[in-house]
Every structure is written in C-alpha cells, then in structure tokens.
Image: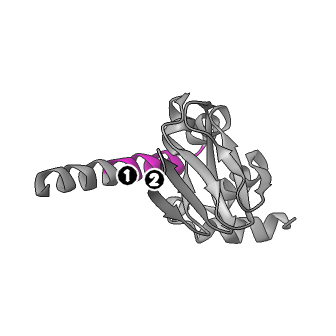
Amino acid sequence: MLLTLEKVLVLKNVPLFAGIPEAALSDIVAAAEETAAMIGADIVKAGEPWNDMYVILQGQVRLHKDGKTVKELNALDVFGELAALDQAPADVTATAVEDASFFKISGTALYRLMNEHKALERNIIKDLCKRIRKLRAERQQG
C-alpha cells in the first residue's frame, strides 16, 4: 500500500492526469480503491456490467476479445474510462498478464470528481477526442 503522497506522485505521471493540480489528484486518490490481480486473473470479463476506470500502478494487462489481443497495457496506462462514463457491458476481457495493482475509480466517483475539478473533466474530454481522431484516421487509411 502506498502513502497518499506517493499515490499523488504516481498519478502525476499518468498522461490522463497531466497538469491536474495536486489538490485534485489528492481527491482522486481518496476516491480510488486500491486493488490487485494475480497473473492470469480476469479483471473484467466481456459481457459483464462495467462501470469502473482502472489506473495500472504496476504489472501488465491484456485487453482481448474472442482470443485476439486488442491492446496490451502497462504501468501508468488507464482503461475503462468509457465504462466509467457510460455503464455498459464490457466489450473486451481485461486479464492480468503478470501480477498487477490498480487504482479503481467508480463511475459515480469519476463524475463527482469531474464536477469538482474542471481540469480533470477537460483532460478526459481531450483524451476521448484524441481517441476518436485516431480511430477516424485509421478508418480513412484502411
């Protein structure tokens, strides 16, 4: 278990939280639940309800569907932002490729934090816009 200050320092290095004031990061830490998954454990299974965002503190996570890898994620990567913003059944399974630890932030907590800290809200919107642009560019190339 990390101390609050250590947790804030970790979040400062997560691109999604870049430029967010330390007071807001402290609130995010307070709202987050520290969780862990052993190698091979599913964190989320495709088809199950999902309403949480995860920040990987250590370890590696594989997002996959129908046996095909969608994405490999490492420490300081985030997944589940869409699920936290709009609960829906998971479209992928997230499996720990090695022992991993996370900050887990519920959708309810994320909305409260975004309401209280506009910098967080802006960062999440910018991140989602970036993803949409990337998907558009990939579709236009393919």
Start and end of the magenta stretch?
117-129
Residue 90 image offset from top left, x and y in percent: 54, 35
Query: With 25 as the anchor, is 89 left or right in this view?
Result: left
Q: Quadrant of residue 61?
A: bottom right
The residue carrying mark 1 is 126
Callout 2 amino acid: Asn
Nearest to the observer: residue 27 or residue 38: 38
Nearest to the observer: residue 69 or residue 126: 69
Instruction: Name the residue rendered at 34%, 52% in the picture.
Output: 131
SS state under label 2? helix
Instruction: Name the residue rendered at 56%, 41% in the picture.
Output: 114
Placement of 68 over or under 77, stated as above or below: above
Instruction: Name the residue rendered at 64%, 42% in the picture.
Output: 44
SS state under label 1? helix
Nearest to the observer: residue 139 or residue 111: 139
Callout 1 amino acid: Lys
Placement of 25 over or under 122, stated as above or below: below
Residue 31 image offset from top left, x and y in percent: 75, 45
Instruction: Name the residue rendered at 56%, 59% in the picture.
Output: 62
Residue projecting furthest to the front: 67
Query: With 86 as the anchor, is 141 left or right in this view?
Result: left
Q: Is residue 119 magenta?
A: yes
The residue carrying mark 2 is 123
Disc 1 to disc 2, how far (Cα)? Answer: 5 Å
Marks 1 & 2, CB-CB < 8 Å contact: yes
Placement of 69 over or under 48, stated as above or below: below
Q: Give the total of numbered labels.
A: 2
Q: Quadrant of residue 113?
A: top right
Nearest to the observer: residue 64 or residue 128: 64
**If the image is split into quadrants, where does the N terminus sit?**
bottom right
**If the image is split into quadrants, where does the C terminus sit?**
bottom left
Residue 117 image offset from top left, x and y in percent: 58, 46
